[in-house]
Amino acid sequence: MTPPVFVALNDSGAALSRRLMSDIAGAELHGYAPRVSDSDVPFERVQDHLRAIFSDGRPMVAIMSTGIVVRAIGALAMDKRREAPVICMNDTGSSVVPLLGGHSGGNRLAAQLASKLGVAAAITTGGDSRFGLALDDPPPGWRCSNVDAAKPVMAALLADEPVKLINDSSIDEAWLDGLDGTFDDGGSLSIVISEQAATDPEQFTLHPQTHVAGVGCERGVGSEEVISLITESLASKNIAPQSLAALATIDIKEDETALRQAAAHFGVPLRLFTAAELEAETPRVTEPSDYVFETVGCHSVSEAAALASAGPDSGLAVPKMKSARATCAIARSPQIIDPSSTGRAAGHLSIVGIGPGRADWRAPEATSAIACATDLVGYRLYLDLLGGLTEGKIRHDYDLGEETDRVAHALNLAAVGKQVALVSSGDAGIYAMASLAFELIDQGENDAWKRLAVEVVPGISALQAGAARSGAPLGHDFCAISLSDLMTPWEVIENRLAKAGEGDFVIALYNPVSKRRRDQFGIAKDILLKSRPGEAPVLLARNLGREDEALTLTTLNDVHADIIDMLTVVIIGSSETRVIDRADGSFHLYTPRGYGDKKK
Protein backbone atom coordinates (compact mmCIF):
# COMPACT_ATOMS: atom_id res chain seq x y z
CA MET A 1 0.00 0.00 0.00
CA THR A 2 1.19 3.51 -0.80
CA PRO A 3 2.27 5.38 2.36
CA PRO A 4 -0.68 7.24 3.88
CA VAL A 5 -1.26 10.97 4.12
CA PHE A 6 -2.18 12.20 7.61
CA VAL A 7 -4.37 15.30 7.48
CA ALA A 8 -4.66 17.49 10.59
CA LEU A 9 -6.72 20.62 11.24
CA ASN A 10 -4.92 21.77 14.39
CA ASP A 11 -1.69 21.32 16.31
CA SER A 12 -3.05 18.58 18.57
CA GLY A 13 -4.05 16.55 15.51
CA ALA A 14 -0.63 17.22 14.01
CA ALA A 15 1.10 15.98 17.16
CA LEU A 16 -0.98 12.78 17.12
CA SER A 17 -0.13 12.32 13.43
CA ARG A 18 3.60 12.66 14.06
CA ARG A 19 3.36 10.04 16.80
CA LEU A 20 1.53 7.58 14.56
CA MET A 21 3.72 8.29 11.52
CA SER A 22 6.94 7.46 13.32
CA ASP A 23 6.99 3.83 12.19
CA ILE A 24 5.18 4.19 8.83
CA ALA A 25 7.78 4.69 6.11
CA GLY A 26 6.97 7.47 3.67
CA ALA A 27 3.94 8.88 5.53
CA GLU A 28 3.32 12.63 5.17
CA LEU A 29 1.58 15.19 7.37
CA HIS A 30 -0.66 17.70 5.59
CA GLY A 31 -1.75 20.53 7.89
CA TYR A 32 -4.43 23.22 7.70
CA ALA A 33 -2.16 26.25 7.39
CA PRO A 34 -4.10 28.70 9.63
CA ARG A 35 -4.01 26.29 12.62
CA VAL A 36 -1.11 23.85 12.11
CA SER A 37 2.28 25.39 12.79
CA ASP A 38 4.45 22.62 11.31
CA SER A 39 3.51 20.20 8.52
CA ASP A 40 5.05 18.60 5.47
CA VAL A 41 2.37 20.06 3.21
CA PRO A 42 0.34 23.10 4.32
CA PHE A 43 -3.06 23.74 2.72
CA GLU A 44 -5.74 26.42 2.91
CA ARG A 45 -8.98 24.83 1.64
CA VAL A 46 -9.95 21.75 3.62
CA GLN A 47 -12.53 20.08 1.41
CA ASP A 48 -10.64 20.79 -1.81
CA HIS A 49 -7.50 19.27 -0.29
CA LEU A 50 -9.31 16.13 0.91
CA ARG A 51 -10.81 15.65 -2.54
CA ALA A 52 -7.39 16.05 -4.18
CA ILE A 53 -5.79 13.39 -1.95
CA PHE A 54 -8.64 10.95 -2.53
CA SER A 55 -8.65 11.57 -6.30
CA ASP A 56 -4.91 10.87 -6.39
CA GLY A 57 -5.62 7.43 -4.92
CA ARG A 58 -3.53 8.01 -1.79
CA PRO A 59 -4.50 6.41 1.54
CA MET A 60 -5.65 9.08 3.96
CA VAL A 61 -5.85 9.30 7.75
CA ALA A 62 -7.98 12.35 8.53
CA ILE A 63 -7.74 13.70 12.09
CA MET A 64 -11.16 15.34 12.02
CA SER A 65 -14.85 14.54 12.16
CA THR A 66 -16.27 11.97 9.78
CA GLY A 67 -18.84 14.52 8.63
CA ILE A 68 -16.19 16.79 7.12
CA VAL A 69 -14.66 13.89 5.21
CA VAL A 70 -17.97 12.43 4.03
CA ARG A 71 -19.17 15.80 2.71
CA ALA A 72 -15.84 16.34 0.93
CA ILE A 73 -15.38 13.01 -0.84
CA GLY A 74 -18.76 11.28 -0.69
CA ALA A 75 -19.60 11.97 -4.33
CA LEU A 76 -16.20 10.61 -5.42
CA ALA A 77 -16.62 7.22 -3.72
CA MET A 78 -17.92 5.24 -6.69
CA ASP A 79 -15.84 2.04 -6.91
CA LYS A 80 -14.95 0.11 -3.76
CA ARG A 81 -12.49 -2.04 -5.72
CA ARG A 82 -10.37 0.94 -6.70
CA GLU A 83 -10.78 3.54 -3.95
CA ALA A 84 -7.91 4.16 -1.56
CA PRO A 85 -8.36 3.69 2.21
CA VAL A 86 -9.83 6.57 4.19
CA ILE A 87 -9.65 6.53 7.99
CA CYS A 88 -11.01 9.12 10.41
CA MET A 89 -9.73 9.77 13.92
CA ASN A 90 -10.39 12.32 16.62
CA ASP A 91 -7.41 14.33 17.84
CA THR A 92 -7.29 12.51 21.19
CA GLY A 93 -6.77 9.16 19.45
CA SER A 94 -9.69 7.48 21.20
CA SER A 95 -11.60 6.75 17.97
CA VAL A 96 -10.26 5.08 14.82
CA VAL A 97 -12.89 4.68 12.11
CA PRO A 98 -12.11 3.21 8.66
CA LEU A 99 -14.60 4.80 6.25
CA LEU A 100 -13.53 3.52 2.82
CA GLY A 101 -11.11 1.06 1.28
CA GLY A 102 -11.48 -1.50 4.05
CA HIS A 103 -10.57 -4.35 1.74
CA SER A 104 -7.69 -2.50 0.08
CA GLY A 105 -5.70 -2.11 3.26
CA GLY A 106 -7.89 0.32 5.18
CA ASN A 107 -8.98 -2.10 7.87
CA ARG A 108 -5.44 -3.34 8.39
CA LEU A 109 -4.12 0.21 8.67
CA ALA A 110 -6.92 1.15 11.09
CA ALA A 111 -6.15 -1.88 13.24
CA GLN A 112 -2.44 -1.00 13.20
CA LEU A 113 -3.11 2.60 14.31
CA ALA A 114 -5.62 1.53 16.95
CA SER A 115 -3.18 -1.01 18.36
CA LYS A 116 -0.51 1.67 18.75
CA LEU A 117 -3.03 3.86 20.58
CA GLY A 118 -4.32 1.04 22.77
CA VAL A 119 -7.89 1.31 21.50
CA ALA A 120 -10.16 -0.80 19.30
CA ALA A 121 -10.67 0.21 15.68
CA ALA A 122 -14.32 0.75 14.81
CA ILE A 123 -14.25 -1.73 11.93
CA THR A 124 -17.77 -2.16 10.63
CA THR A 125 -17.00 -4.52 7.73
CA GLY A 126 -18.85 -7.67 8.75
CA GLY A 127 -16.21 -10.32 8.09
CA ASP A 128 -13.36 -8.28 9.55
CA SER A 129 -15.20 -7.32 12.72
CA ARG A 130 -16.61 -10.77 13.48
CA PHE A 131 -14.08 -13.19 11.99
CA GLY A 132 -10.97 -11.04 11.75
CA LEU A 133 -10.54 -11.63 8.02
CA ALA A 134 -11.86 -10.61 4.62
CA LEU A 135 -12.40 -13.30 2.02
CA ASP A 136 -11.91 -10.89 -0.87
CA ASP A 137 -8.67 -9.51 0.62
CA PRO A 138 -6.70 -12.68 1.38
CA PRO A 139 -3.20 -12.64 2.94
CA PRO A 140 0.02 -12.75 0.88
CA GLY A 141 0.37 -16.00 -1.05
CA TRP A 142 -3.33 -16.23 -1.80
CA ARG A 143 -5.50 -14.71 -4.51
CA CYS A 144 -9.14 -15.03 -5.38
CA SER A 145 -11.02 -15.23 -8.62
CA ASN A 146 -14.67 -14.23 -9.07
CA VAL A 147 -14.33 -11.66 -6.28
CA ASP A 148 -18.01 -10.71 -6.43
CA ALA A 149 -18.92 -14.22 -5.27
CA ALA A 150 -17.31 -13.46 -1.88
CA LYS A 151 -20.17 -11.17 -0.86
CA PRO A 152 -22.99 -13.78 -0.66
CA VAL A 153 -20.63 -16.26 1.02
CA MET A 154 -19.67 -13.80 3.73
CA ALA A 155 -23.29 -12.74 4.12
CA ALA A 156 -24.25 -16.38 4.72
CA LEU A 157 -21.45 -16.84 7.26
CA LEU A 158 -22.53 -13.72 9.13
CA ALA A 159 -26.11 -15.03 9.17
CA ASP A 160 -24.90 -18.36 10.59
CA GLU A 161 -26.07 -20.15 7.47
CA PRO A 162 -24.16 -23.28 6.39
CA VAL A 163 -21.27 -22.82 3.95
CA LYS A 164 -19.17 -25.65 2.53
CA LEU A 165 -15.37 -25.57 2.53
CA ILE A 166 -13.92 -27.53 -0.37
CA ASN A 167 -10.13 -27.83 -0.48
CA ASP A 168 -8.92 -29.76 -3.50
CA SER A 169 -5.38 -28.53 -2.96
CA SER A 170 -2.71 -29.87 -0.64
CA ILE A 171 -2.16 -26.37 0.77
CA ASP A 172 -3.23 -25.72 4.36
CA GLU A 173 -5.92 -23.07 4.73
CA ALA A 174 -4.97 -22.13 8.31
CA TRP A 175 -5.64 -18.43 7.70
CA LEU A 176 -9.35 -19.31 7.55
CA ASP A 177 -9.27 -20.60 11.14
CA GLY A 178 -11.37 -17.63 12.20
CA LEU A 179 -14.26 -19.26 10.39
CA ASP A 180 -13.99 -22.52 12.37
CA GLY A 181 -17.36 -23.83 13.37
CA THR A 182 -19.15 -22.08 10.53
CA PHE A 183 -18.59 -24.66 7.79
CA ASP A 184 -21.16 -27.32 7.00
CA ASP A 185 -21.19 -29.82 4.16
CA GLY A 186 -24.90 -29.20 3.74
CA GLY A 187 -24.49 -25.57 2.73
CA SER A 188 -25.72 -24.30 -0.61
CA LEU A 189 -22.78 -21.90 -0.94
CA SER A 190 -19.14 -22.88 -0.79
CA ILE A 191 -15.57 -21.64 -0.48
CA VAL A 192 -13.36 -23.59 -2.84
CA ILE A 193 -9.60 -23.73 -2.37
CA SER A 194 -7.99 -24.82 -5.61
CA GLU A 195 -4.97 -24.38 -7.84
CA GLN A 196 -7.23 -25.11 -10.81
CA ALA A 197 -9.03 -22.47 -12.85
CA ALA A 198 -12.48 -21.59 -11.53
CA THR A 199 -15.27 -22.58 -13.90
CA ASP A 200 -18.40 -21.53 -11.99
CA PRO A 201 -18.78 -17.73 -11.69
CA GLU A 202 -21.19 -18.23 -8.78
CA GLN A 203 -18.62 -20.14 -6.75
CA PHE A 204 -16.07 -18.26 -4.66
CA THR A 205 -12.59 -19.67 -5.21
CA LEU A 206 -9.32 -19.03 -3.37
CA HIS A 207 -6.06 -19.88 -5.10
CA PRO A 208 -2.77 -20.55 -3.27
CA GLN A 209 0.17 -19.13 -5.24
CA THR A 210 2.17 -22.31 -5.81
CA HIS A 211 3.27 -22.00 -9.44
CA VAL A 212 5.95 -20.12 -11.38
CA ALA A 213 6.06 -19.48 -15.11
CA GLY A 214 9.59 -19.72 -16.51
CA VAL A 215 10.05 -17.90 -19.81
CA GLY A 216 12.79 -17.76 -22.43
CA CYS A 217 12.53 -15.59 -25.51
CA GLU A 218 14.22 -14.03 -28.50
CA ARG A 219 15.21 -10.38 -28.44
CA GLY A 220 12.33 -8.02 -29.11
CA VAL A 221 9.53 -10.55 -28.72
CA GLY A 222 6.11 -8.98 -28.40
CA SER A 223 4.29 -8.96 -25.08
CA GLU A 224 1.13 -10.38 -26.66
CA GLU A 225 3.03 -13.48 -27.75
CA VAL A 226 4.53 -14.03 -24.28
CA ILE A 227 1.23 -13.49 -22.48
CA SER A 228 -0.56 -15.81 -24.90
CA LEU A 229 2.06 -18.54 -24.43
CA ILE A 230 1.89 -18.36 -20.63
CA THR A 231 -1.91 -18.44 -20.78
CA GLU A 232 -1.81 -21.46 -23.10
CA SER A 233 0.71 -23.23 -20.85
CA LEU A 234 -1.47 -22.72 -17.77
CA ALA A 235 -4.60 -23.79 -19.61
CA SER A 236 -2.95 -27.01 -20.79
CA LYS A 237 -3.21 -28.30 -17.21
CA ASN A 238 -6.15 -26.12 -16.16
CA ILE A 239 -3.95 -24.15 -13.75
CA ALA A 240 -5.52 -20.92 -12.52
CA PRO A 241 -3.62 -17.76 -13.50
CA GLN A 242 -4.24 -16.62 -9.92
CA SER A 243 -2.08 -19.54 -8.75
CA LEU A 244 1.00 -17.95 -10.31
CA ALA A 245 3.45 -16.51 -7.79
CA ALA A 246 6.10 -15.20 -10.20
CA LEU A 247 7.43 -15.05 -13.71
CA ALA A 248 11.11 -16.08 -13.94
CA THR A 249 13.84 -15.82 -16.56
CA ILE A 250 17.61 -15.42 -17.07
CA ASP A 251 19.07 -12.10 -15.89
CA ILE A 252 20.27 -11.01 -19.33
CA LYS A 253 16.59 -10.70 -20.30
CA GLU A 254 15.97 -8.03 -17.66
CA ASP A 255 15.49 -5.40 -20.36
CA GLU A 256 12.87 -7.33 -22.32
CA THR A 257 9.80 -5.12 -22.18
CA ALA A 258 7.58 -8.09 -23.07
CA LEU A 259 8.60 -9.96 -19.91
CA ARG A 260 7.95 -6.97 -17.66
CA GLN A 261 4.59 -6.42 -19.30
CA ALA A 262 3.69 -10.10 -18.97
CA ALA A 263 4.54 -10.05 -15.27
CA ALA A 264 2.37 -6.95 -14.85
CA HIS A 265 -0.45 -8.62 -16.81
CA PHE A 266 -0.54 -11.56 -14.40
CA GLY A 267 0.07 -9.33 -11.37
CA VAL A 268 3.26 -11.12 -10.27
CA PRO A 269 6.91 -10.10 -9.86
CA LEU A 270 9.60 -10.80 -12.44
CA ARG A 271 12.48 -12.79 -10.89
CA LEU A 272 15.90 -13.05 -12.48
CA PHE A 273 18.55 -15.78 -12.29
CA THR A 274 22.14 -15.97 -13.43
CA ALA A 275 23.25 -18.53 -15.99
CA ALA A 276 25.11 -20.39 -13.21
CA GLU A 277 21.96 -20.57 -11.08
CA LEU A 278 19.98 -21.94 -14.01
CA GLU A 279 22.72 -24.40 -14.96
CA ALA A 280 22.45 -25.89 -11.46
CA GLU A 281 18.87 -26.93 -12.34
CA THR A 282 19.96 -28.93 -15.42
CA PRO A 283 19.46 -32.37 -13.74
CA ARG A 284 15.78 -31.48 -13.26
CA VAL A 285 14.94 -30.19 -16.74
CA THR A 286 13.41 -32.34 -19.48
CA GLU A 287 15.14 -30.89 -22.54
CA PRO A 288 18.67 -29.65 -21.85
CA SER A 289 20.06 -27.93 -24.93
CA ASP A 290 23.70 -27.57 -25.93
CA TYR A 291 22.70 -24.74 -28.26
CA VAL A 292 21.17 -22.79 -25.38
CA PHE A 293 24.29 -23.47 -23.31
CA GLU A 294 26.54 -22.09 -26.07
CA THR A 295 24.29 -19.06 -26.40
CA VAL A 296 23.63 -18.01 -22.78
CA GLY A 297 25.74 -20.31 -20.60
CA CYS A 298 23.09 -22.73 -19.30
CA HIS A 299 21.30 -25.74 -20.79
CA SER A 300 17.78 -24.43 -20.17
CA VAL A 301 16.05 -21.11 -19.52
CA SER A 302 12.29 -21.59 -19.22
CA GLU A 303 12.27 -24.91 -17.33
CA ALA A 304 15.33 -24.08 -15.23
CA ALA A 305 14.01 -20.62 -14.31
CA ALA A 306 10.61 -22.02 -13.29
CA LEU A 307 12.23 -24.69 -11.11
CA ALA A 308 14.80 -22.34 -9.58
CA SER A 309 12.11 -19.83 -8.62
CA ALA A 310 9.67 -22.45 -7.30
CA GLY A 311 12.34 -23.92 -5.02
CA PRO A 312 14.16 -27.22 -4.47
CA ASP A 313 10.98 -29.17 -3.65
CA SER A 314 9.25 -28.12 -6.86
CA GLY A 315 8.61 -30.07 -10.03
CA LEU A 316 7.50 -29.31 -13.55
CA ALA A 317 3.74 -29.08 -13.86
CA VAL A 318 4.00 -28.10 -17.53
CA PRO A 319 7.21 -28.94 -19.45
CA LYS A 320 8.51 -26.46 -21.97
CA MET A 321 6.04 -25.22 -24.56
CA LYS A 322 7.02 -23.10 -27.55
CA SER A 323 5.67 -20.26 -29.63
CA ALA A 324 7.38 -18.65 -32.59
CA ARG A 325 9.81 -16.59 -30.47
CA ALA A 326 9.38 -17.73 -26.85
CA THR A 327 9.32 -20.76 -24.57
CA CYS A 328 7.41 -21.29 -21.32
CA ALA A 329 7.39 -23.92 -18.59
CA ILE A 330 5.36 -24.05 -15.37
CA ALA A 331 6.76 -25.37 -12.09
CA ARG A 332 4.74 -26.19 -8.97
CA SER A 333 5.82 -26.09 -5.34
CA PRO A 334 4.11 -28.17 -2.62
CA GLN A 335 3.84 -24.98 -0.54
CA ILE A 336 3.03 -21.35 -1.14
CA ILE A 337 5.93 -19.62 -2.88
CA ASP A 338 7.66 -16.52 -1.55
CA PRO A 339 9.08 -15.08 -4.79
CA SER A 340 11.64 -12.97 -2.94
CA SER A 341 13.34 -16.09 -1.52
CA THR A 342 15.08 -17.01 -4.79
CA GLY A 343 16.71 -15.11 -7.62
CA ARG A 344 16.59 -11.34 -7.61
CA ALA A 345 14.11 -8.66 -8.51
CA ALA A 346 14.22 -6.70 -11.74
CA GLY A 347 16.00 -3.49 -10.86
CA HIS A 348 14.39 -0.11 -11.41
CA LEU A 349 15.82 3.39 -11.40
CA SER A 350 13.59 6.43 -10.99
CA ILE A 351 15.38 9.74 -11.57
CA VAL A 352 13.22 12.08 -9.55
CA GLY A 353 12.97 15.85 -9.59
CA ILE A 354 11.56 17.14 -6.29
CA GLY A 355 11.35 20.83 -7.23
CA PRO A 356 12.65 23.15 -4.53
CA GLY A 357 11.97 20.52 -1.86
CA ARG A 358 8.54 21.63 -0.64
CA ALA A 359 6.09 18.75 -0.50
CA ASP A 360 3.28 20.83 -2.02
CA TRP A 361 5.53 21.63 -5.00
CA ARG A 362 6.42 17.97 -5.50
CA ALA A 363 4.50 15.99 -8.11
CA PRO A 364 2.43 13.04 -6.79
CA GLU A 365 4.35 10.83 -9.23
CA ALA A 366 7.61 11.89 -7.55
CA THR A 367 6.21 11.12 -4.10
CA SER A 368 5.04 7.72 -5.34
CA ALA A 369 8.43 6.91 -6.89
CA ILE A 370 10.21 7.78 -3.65
CA ALA A 371 7.69 5.83 -1.58
CA CYS A 372 8.19 2.73 -3.76
CA ALA A 373 11.98 2.89 -3.63
CA THR A 374 14.09 0.68 -1.39
CA ASP A 375 17.12 2.98 -1.76
CA LEU A 376 17.46 6.76 -2.08
CA VAL A 377 20.55 8.30 -3.64
CA GLY A 378 21.30 12.02 -3.71
CA TYR A 379 22.98 15.11 -2.33
CA ARG A 380 22.35 14.93 1.42
CA LEU A 381 20.50 18.28 1.54
CA TYR A 382 18.02 17.11 -1.11
CA LEU A 383 17.35 13.89 0.81
CA ASP A 384 16.85 15.88 4.01
CA LEU A 385 14.22 17.97 2.22
CA LEU A 386 12.10 14.82 1.77
CA GLY A 387 11.42 14.65 5.51
CA GLY A 388 9.34 11.64 6.52
CA LEU A 389 9.45 10.13 3.02
CA THR A 390 12.95 8.83 3.76
CA GLU A 391 11.81 6.78 6.76
CA GLY A 392 12.40 3.07 6.24
CA LYS A 393 14.58 3.69 3.17
CA ILE A 394 18.31 3.08 2.80
CA ARG A 395 19.90 6.48 2.26
CA HIS A 396 23.02 6.95 0.18
CA ASP A 397 24.08 10.53 0.92
CA TYR A 398 26.61 12.39 -1.21
CA ASP A 399 28.30 15.79 -1.06
CA LEU A 400 28.27 18.35 -3.85
CA GLY A 401 30.77 17.65 -6.58
CA GLU A 402 30.27 13.87 -6.47
CA GLU A 403 27.73 13.71 -9.27
CA THR A 404 29.31 10.94 -11.33
CA ASP A 405 29.94 8.78 -8.26
CA ARG A 406 26.37 9.17 -7.02
CA VAL A 407 24.80 8.34 -10.39
CA ALA A 408 27.05 5.31 -10.88
CA HIS A 409 26.15 4.11 -7.39
CA ALA A 410 22.44 4.47 -8.14
CA LEU A 411 22.86 2.46 -11.34
CA ASN A 412 24.83 -0.24 -9.53
CA LEU A 413 22.16 -0.55 -6.84
CA ALA A 414 19.43 -0.94 -9.46
CA ALA A 415 21.56 -3.46 -11.34
CA VAL A 416 21.45 -5.85 -8.37
CA GLY A 417 17.66 -5.65 -8.13
CA LYS A 418 17.08 -2.62 -5.92
CA GLN A 419 14.25 -0.17 -6.50
CA VAL A 420 16.21 3.08 -6.56
CA ALA A 421 15.25 6.75 -6.56
CA LEU A 422 18.02 9.11 -7.66
CA VAL A 423 16.93 12.46 -6.26
CA SER A 424 17.56 15.89 -7.79
CA SER A 425 16.21 19.29 -6.87
CA GLY A 426 14.24 21.14 -9.51
CA ASP A 427 13.66 19.01 -12.60
CA ALA A 428 16.02 16.04 -12.90
CA GLY A 429 16.26 16.52 -16.66
CA ILE A 430 17.31 20.20 -16.56
CA TYR A 431 20.99 20.67 -15.65
CA ALA A 432 20.68 17.70 -13.31
CA MET A 433 21.22 13.97 -12.91
CA ALA A 434 19.07 12.47 -15.68
CA SER A 435 21.38 13.35 -18.58
CA LEU A 436 24.43 12.05 -16.67
CA ALA A 437 22.64 8.77 -15.92
CA PHE A 438 21.87 8.19 -19.60
CA GLU A 439 25.39 9.25 -20.57
CA LEU A 440 26.89 6.62 -18.26
CA ILE A 441 24.49 4.00 -19.59
CA ASP A 442 25.36 4.97 -23.16
CA GLN A 443 29.11 4.75 -22.53
CA GLY A 444 28.62 1.05 -21.82
CA GLU A 445 30.84 0.73 -18.75
CA ASN A 446 28.45 -1.86 -17.31
CA ASP A 447 26.21 -4.05 -19.48
CA ALA A 448 23.81 -4.51 -16.59
CA TRP A 449 23.04 -0.78 -16.63
CA LYS A 450 21.72 -1.06 -20.18
CA ARG A 451 19.19 -3.69 -19.09
CA LEU A 452 17.62 -1.52 -16.39
CA ALA A 453 14.16 -0.02 -16.47
CA VAL A 454 14.77 3.73 -16.09
CA GLU A 455 12.15 6.45 -15.74
CA VAL A 456 12.49 10.19 -15.29
CA VAL A 457 9.95 11.90 -13.04
CA PRO A 458 9.59 15.64 -13.70
CA GLY A 459 9.81 18.35 -11.08
CA ILE A 460 9.32 22.10 -10.92
CA SER A 461 12.46 23.73 -12.27
CA ALA A 462 13.91 27.04 -11.10
CA LEU A 463 12.94 28.77 -14.35
CA GLN A 464 9.34 27.55 -14.02
CA ALA A 465 9.12 28.56 -10.38
CA GLY A 466 10.67 31.97 -10.97
CA ALA A 467 8.39 32.62 -13.90
CA ALA A 468 5.28 31.59 -11.94
CA ARG A 469 6.21 33.70 -8.93
CA SER A 470 6.68 36.80 -11.08
CA GLY A 471 3.89 36.36 -13.62
CA ALA A 472 4.50 34.89 -17.08
CA PRO A 473 7.86 36.00 -18.49
CA LEU A 474 8.17 32.70 -20.37
CA GLY A 475 4.89 33.30 -22.18
CA HIS A 476 6.66 33.33 -25.55
CA ASP A 477 9.82 31.69 -26.90
CA PHE A 478 12.58 31.29 -24.35
CA CYS A 479 15.80 29.37 -23.74
CA ALA A 480 18.02 28.38 -20.82
CA ILE A 481 21.81 28.79 -20.73
CA SER A 482 24.19 27.78 -17.97
CA LEU A 483 27.13 30.14 -17.37
CA SER A 484 29.18 27.38 -15.76
CA ASP A 485 32.21 26.53 -17.87
CA LEU A 486 32.99 23.37 -15.91
CA MET A 487 31.15 21.26 -18.48
CA THR A 488 31.01 23.62 -21.48
CA PRO A 489 33.86 25.69 -22.98
CA TRP A 490 33.34 29.39 -22.35
CA GLU A 491 33.61 30.26 -26.05
CA VAL A 492 30.63 27.94 -26.70
CA ILE A 493 28.64 29.69 -23.97
CA GLU A 494 29.51 33.10 -25.45
CA ASN A 495 28.27 31.96 -28.87
CA ARG A 496 25.01 30.69 -27.42
CA LEU A 497 24.45 33.95 -25.54
CA ALA A 498 25.01 35.96 -28.72
CA LYS A 499 22.65 33.80 -30.78
CA ALA A 500 19.95 33.82 -28.07
CA GLY A 501 20.22 37.61 -27.84
CA GLU A 502 19.98 38.00 -31.61
CA GLY A 503 16.97 35.70 -31.64
CA ASP A 504 15.25 37.87 -29.02
CA PHE A 505 14.59 34.93 -26.72
CA VAL A 506 13.68 35.40 -23.10
CA ILE A 507 16.79 33.90 -21.46
CA ALA A 508 17.02 32.02 -18.18
CA LEU A 509 20.60 31.96 -16.89
CA TYR A 510 21.51 29.06 -14.62
CA ASN A 511 24.68 28.97 -12.50
CA PRO A 512 25.19 32.71 -13.09
CA VAL A 513 28.11 33.12 -10.66
CA SER A 514 30.13 31.13 -8.15
CA LYS A 515 32.93 31.87 -5.70
CA ARG A 516 35.52 31.40 -8.44
CA ARG A 517 33.46 32.65 -11.39
CA ARG A 518 32.89 36.37 -10.87
CA ASP A 519 33.72 37.81 -14.29
CA GLN A 520 31.66 35.68 -16.67
CA PHE A 521 28.36 37.28 -15.74
CA GLY A 522 29.64 40.71 -16.71
CA ILE A 523 30.84 39.34 -20.04
CA ALA A 524 27.44 37.70 -20.61
CA LYS A 525 25.72 40.99 -19.83
CA ASP A 526 27.89 42.89 -22.33
CA ILE A 527 27.11 40.31 -25.03
CA LEU A 528 23.37 40.68 -24.48
CA LEU A 529 23.51 44.47 -24.41
CA LYS A 530 24.60 44.31 -28.05
CA SER A 531 21.20 42.92 -29.07
CA ARG A 532 18.71 44.31 -26.56
CA PRO A 533 18.18 47.56 -24.67
CA GLY A 534 19.62 48.25 -21.23
CA GLU A 535 16.05 48.81 -19.98
CA ALA A 536 15.16 45.16 -20.65
CA PRO A 537 13.62 43.76 -17.43
CA VAL A 538 15.68 41.24 -15.46
CA LEU A 539 14.27 39.00 -12.73
CA LEU A 540 16.52 37.65 -9.99
CA ALA A 541 14.75 34.68 -8.39
CA ARG A 542 16.56 33.24 -5.38
CA ASN A 543 15.83 30.18 -3.18
CA LEU A 544 12.51 29.61 -4.87
CA GLY A 545 9.94 27.72 -2.80
CA ARG A 546 12.04 27.96 0.37
CA GLU A 547 11.88 30.12 3.49
CA ASP A 548 14.21 32.87 2.29
CA GLU A 549 12.75 33.09 -1.21
CA ALA A 550 13.38 36.47 -2.79
CA LEU A 551 12.35 38.07 -6.09
CA THR A 552 14.12 41.18 -7.33
CA LEU A 553 13.22 43.12 -10.46
CA THR A 554 15.98 45.13 -12.10
CA THR A 555 17.18 45.96 -15.61
CA LEU A 556 19.93 44.68 -17.84
CA ASN A 557 21.84 47.94 -17.27
CA ASP A 558 21.64 47.68 -13.49
CA VAL A 559 22.18 43.95 -12.87
CA HIS A 560 25.67 42.90 -11.74
CA ALA A 561 27.41 39.87 -10.24
CA ASP A 562 27.57 41.24 -6.70
CA ILE A 563 23.79 40.89 -6.22
CA ILE A 564 23.65 37.31 -7.56
CA ASP A 565 24.72 33.93 -6.19
CA MET A 566 24.52 30.25 -7.19
CA LEU A 567 21.04 29.97 -5.65
CA THR A 568 19.71 32.57 -8.10
CA VAL A 569 18.21 32.00 -11.50
CA VAL A 570 18.33 35.09 -13.72
CA ILE A 571 15.52 35.63 -16.23
CA ILE A 572 16.29 38.30 -18.82
CA GLY A 573 13.30 39.61 -20.74
CA SER A 574 13.06 39.92 -24.51
CA SER A 575 12.18 43.12 -26.35
CA GLU A 576 8.51 42.21 -25.82
CA THR A 577 8.64 41.49 -22.07
CA ARG A 578 6.53 43.89 -20.02
CA VAL A 579 6.28 44.92 -16.35
CA ILE A 580 3.03 45.74 -14.52
CA ASP A 581 3.72 47.78 -11.40
CA ARG A 582 1.17 47.28 -8.63
CA ALA A 583 0.00 49.74 -6.00
CA ASP A 584 1.45 47.67 -3.16
CA GLY A 585 4.94 47.83 -4.65
CA SER A 586 4.86 44.33 -6.16
CA PHE A 587 4.93 43.60 -9.87
CA HIS A 588 3.88 41.22 -12.62
CA LEU A 589 6.32 40.32 -15.36
CA TYR A 590 5.03 38.87 -18.63
CA THR A 591 5.91 38.31 -22.27
CA PRO A 592 2.87 38.54 -24.56
CA ARG A 593 2.46 35.91 -27.22
CA GLY A 594 0.29 38.04 -29.48
CA TYR A 595 -3.19 36.86 -28.62
CA GLY A 596 -4.34 40.46 -28.26
CA ASP A 597 -3.20 41.33 -31.76
CA LYS A 598 -5.19 38.39 -33.15
CA LYS A 599 -8.41 39.91 -31.81
CA LYS A 600 -7.97 43.10 -33.83
Image (cartoon, rainbow, N blue to C red):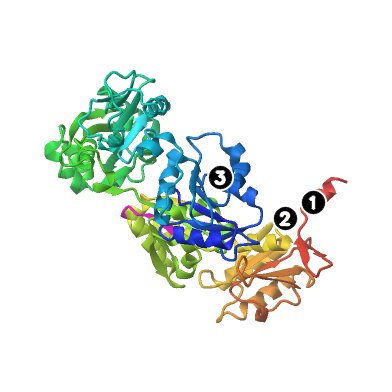
Identify the amino acid type marked 1: Gly
285 vs 51, left or right, is: left
Say which element carries label 1. loop
What residue did someone put label 1 on?
A: 594
Q: Relative to residue 550, is residue 74 depicted above or below?
A: above
**CB under 8 Å between discs 3 and 2:** no
Q: Which of marks 3 and 1 is in front?
A: 3
Q: Residues within 10 Å of mark 3 (few under 14, many from 20)?
A: many
Question: Closer to the camera, 565 or 159?
Answer: 159
Residue 319 x/y as whole percent: 20, 29
Tag 3 near tag 1, CB within 8 Å: no
Disc 2 is placed on an element classified as loop
Q: Distance between the residues labelled 1 and 2?
A: 9 Å
Residue 490 among magenta residues: no
Name the secondary structure under disc 3.
helix
| Callout 1–callout 2 Cβ contact below 8 Å | yes
Nearest the viewer among 225 and 459 is 459
The residues colored magenta run 416-422
Asked whether 419 falls inside the magenta stretch, the response is: yes
Q: Is residue 440 visible?
A: yes
Q: Mark 2 points at which residue?
A: 476
> Could you tell whether 50 is left or right of 224 in the image?
right
Sequence order check: which comes first, mark 1 or mark 2?
A: 2
Residue 38's spot in the image, x, y percent? 57, 65
